[in-house]
Image (cartoon, rainbow, N blue to C red):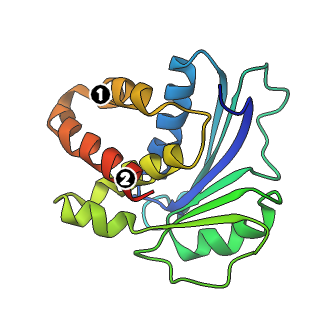
Amino acid sequence: MGKEFEQIIIAGFGGQGVLFLGKVLAQVGMAAGKNVSWIPSYGPEMRGGTANCTVVISDDPIASPIVAEPDTVLAMNRPSVTKFLPKISKGGTLIYNSSLIPDDNFRHDVNVHAVPASKIADDLGNPKVANLVMVGAYVKHNTVLDYELVLQTLPKLIPTKQKELAQVNRAAFIKGYEIG
């Protein structure tokens, strides 16, 4: 069994699927029988502006859904790294979209994983699935969610009118996991 408690911040530009990425993690957590919370944060500038969400996944009841010191940050753009990197707990994890964020001297007391999410999504023919690439990378580097359970749950999260996206979403998740 994996870690019993995980606090996550997912951040990027509006339109990058940041909120959906958080919903995927929360839904898979629920499917695993865990307690979860998901809180979106965005302004009226959602598309093109910044958006983020917090997800807490726990075996125990969640006392507070507020995440001040995340265990993991999934950053889709540079402003997100700038804002949330200082908040990651020591020994925590930063997973960032290296297609849009240059390699940098990130903190030495956190685990850092560069994932070319946007490039992989482009290579798969759909730039909108970069968020699923990040889900795959997250699952690779964290034991709180199970790979197979994500594959089982993912098709249920896609709106009925977009079922044709199921295969590319699955491929993006798998590629993100493999690249990790």
Considering depth in this image, is 124 or 21 the residue closer to the camera? Answer: 124
Considering depth in this image, is 92 or 25 the residue closer to the camera? Answer: 92
Kind of residue sitting beneath label 1: Pro
Residue 100 figure quarter: bottom left
- Whole-number angstrom distance, CA of label 1 to CA of label 2: 19 Å
**Total tally of numbered discs in the picture:** 2
Mark 1 lies on residue: 155
Considering depth in this image, is 112 or 28 the residue closer to the camera? Answer: 112
Q: Position of residue 98 (x, y in %)?
A: 46, 73
Question: Vertical placement of 141 versus 166: above or below?
Answer: below
Task: Say which residue appears at 75% left-offset and 75% top-offset.
Answer: 107
Mark 2 lies on residue: 178
Task: Say which residue appears at 64% left-offset and 57% top-offset.
Answer: 73
Disc 2 secondary structure class: helix
Crowding at mark 1 (Cα within 10 Å: few <14, some 14-19, many 20+):
some
Horizontal relation, residue 29 to residue 60: left or right: left
Question: Vertical placement of 19 versus 158: above or below?
Answer: below
Residue 48 figure quarter: bottom left
Residue 120 figure quarter: bottom left
